[in-house]
Image (cartoon, rainbow, N blue to C red):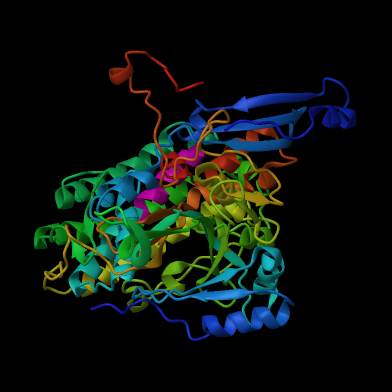
Amino acid sequence: MTGATENLAEMEQVAGPGEILEVSMGPHHPSTHGVFRMDVRLEGEKVVRLKPVFGYLHRNHEKIAEKGAYLAAIPYTDRLDYLCSMTNNWGYVLAVEKLAGIAVPERAEYLRVIVAELTRFQNHAGLTGFLLQDMGASGTPLMYAFREREKILDLFESLSGARMMCNYMRFGGLRVDATPAWLEEVRQLVGRLPRFVDEFEALLRGNEILMARTQGTGVLSRELAINAGVTGPMLRATGVNYDVRKVDHYGIYDRFSFKVPLGDHGDVYDRYMMRILEMRETVKILEQALRDVPGGPVMDPKVRLRGLRPKVGEAYGRIESPKGELGFFLISDGTGNPYRYRVRPPSMINLTVLEDMCLGQNVADVVVTLGSVDIVLGEVDR
Amino acid sequence: MSAGPGVVPALPAVEEIKARIEAAVPGAQVTVIPNGSPSGQHSLVLDCAHARAAAEFLRDDPGLRLDFCSLVTGVDWLDTETSEKIKVKKKVAGPDGVEQEQEVEEVRKTKTPGYLEAVYHLFSMEKKHGPVVVRLRTANRAEGTHVPSLTPVWRSAEFQEREAFDLYGIVFDGHPDLRRILMWDGFVDFPMRKDYVPPADDILETGVAGAEVNP
């Protein structure tokens, strides 16, 4: 996990003796959003080298999943990105459905979209709050965001029994159906969400400190973003139009009309704006899904949940999680547990370019840049 | 019912991609591995000597433009042993002490050496197609666990190849910074391998705190 590979003496030759300061930021630091460390070398306040160090929460999630049945992995996926268990569930069940050729009932597809978009909304609201907290806006924006997030989590609780570890989806459908009363509650909440986004934006837009701290900070170029496999709002902030919901049309995303917001500069400000704009698009998808949700079953009764034994083969299924492309790669050897189970964790791969974004910046901007990546260590470390 | 796995018409079939690689990279040997699952994601095995050039071709070819390497991972395929019963003629001492030729059943065992595999899932952000699955195989699971690194072609492989090195012991030649990433530096084994045995460091079993955890 550790290791300084570059020669400190060489750096000092350029900067002067004793001019390079080594700082270990983390693992216990409020801005790392968990246990995450950065080995930073500074010349004055300027960052000259930065190596992310992680693995503190490593529990070998993949090995655990390979030892259990296909069904048994679903609750473990909740704990990857523990703020977005619904989308983690979806990524995994989508991969199993591809592997075994399972179809999903119409109503389940709509409910999946509804819970996934609610998840996206609360993730983006929370992230924006945390990002502003990192910039010194102590508490207020974060509490505004959490007020709304709490309402969404209450809905998840009344639907699945758990606020965060929902364990809600199954290959071939969903664990339980939503009641008409629940759908009505969601409709009422979704009706209020645009006002929240307006209020949130009005609180922040034009704030001088926000502009000064974010514009031109942590710039990522389009070419590097593509080559380094950066996905999600961070990729789209550089202007690359790539959203798995639009590219793969997984589930029923081809039925909804929504836009993919794109940035231009690839800096922290654009990444922040991506989240605000995506929240607005999410509300549009939710309104359409809630309008069209049909009746019917939410689970294909022919699917063998407990004794699933897919044919020998492999499948890669991916979705657009709030943090980027979340993928699951499964190899079946014909037995009841996966021979290979692999998660493509978007927030870990987005960290690949952290050093590139921070070099030459002030050390205080590292905190802001990291905050704009949107990492959750449960997913980075697995 | 929802649509099945999306088939992107712009992406040529694996056989055609194989032919194109072999035409563009002289000497490259590409093998198609069919996939029996309904996902229909067949894969291509590249030979290690030409993998870098083939990867650059896949990335830069105007018809493919696989500019986005989404997923990199390791897979462990164990040594396999197949046994078959065969009949052989042998001279056996009979009950009266005289050697007689007799047909005896023998079990013949054939060992196939296992290998480690690095799997790359490639997509195109420009053309919005994919995945093309590319695999690199090591010679065996013991000393010859080397494959060429594709990090110089796709930066996104940097951390993921480190992870495959960390958990599977695949050595990626040409990787700029090949270190353990999730396990700590002093760790010696490769926990994702199929024959990995966890250390007996359970305090309830050994009665010693910290035994074998940090040798």
The image shows residue B212, relative to residue A290, as above or below, that is above
The image shows residue A337, relative to residue A50, as above or below, that is below
Q: Is residue A79 visible?
A: yes
Residue A320 colored magenta?
Answer: no
Residue at the image point whose x is 38% and y is 76% from the top: A257
Quadrant assignment for the N terminus of chain A:
top right
Asked which quadrant contains residue B82, the reply is: bottom left
The image shows residue B32, relative to residue A187, as above or below, that is below
Whole-percent x and y of residue A143? 37, 37
The image shows residue A82, relative to residue A87, as above or below, that is above
Residue at the extreme top of the image, as rendered: B208
Residue at the image point whose x is 63% and y is 75% from the top: B65
- Report the magenta residues as a range: A120-132
The residue lying toward the viewer, choosing from B22 and A344, is: B22
Residue A123 colored magenta?
Answer: yes
Secondary structure of the magenta portion, mostly? helix
Residue at the image point whose x is 66% and y is 55% from the top: B149
The residue lying toward the viewer, choosing from B174 and B8, is: B174
Whole-percent x and y of residue A176? 13, 58
Q: Is B77 on the left or on the right of A298, as rendered?
A: right
Q: Is A343 on the left or on the right of B38, as rendered?
A: right
Q: Is residue A236 visible?
A: no
Whole-percent x and y of residue A265? 65, 58
The residue lying toward the viewer, choosing from B116 and A197, is: B116
Residue at the image point whose x is 69% and y is 31% from the top: A4
Whole-percent x and y of residue A122? 35, 50
The residue lying toward the viewer, choosing from A227 and B49, is: B49
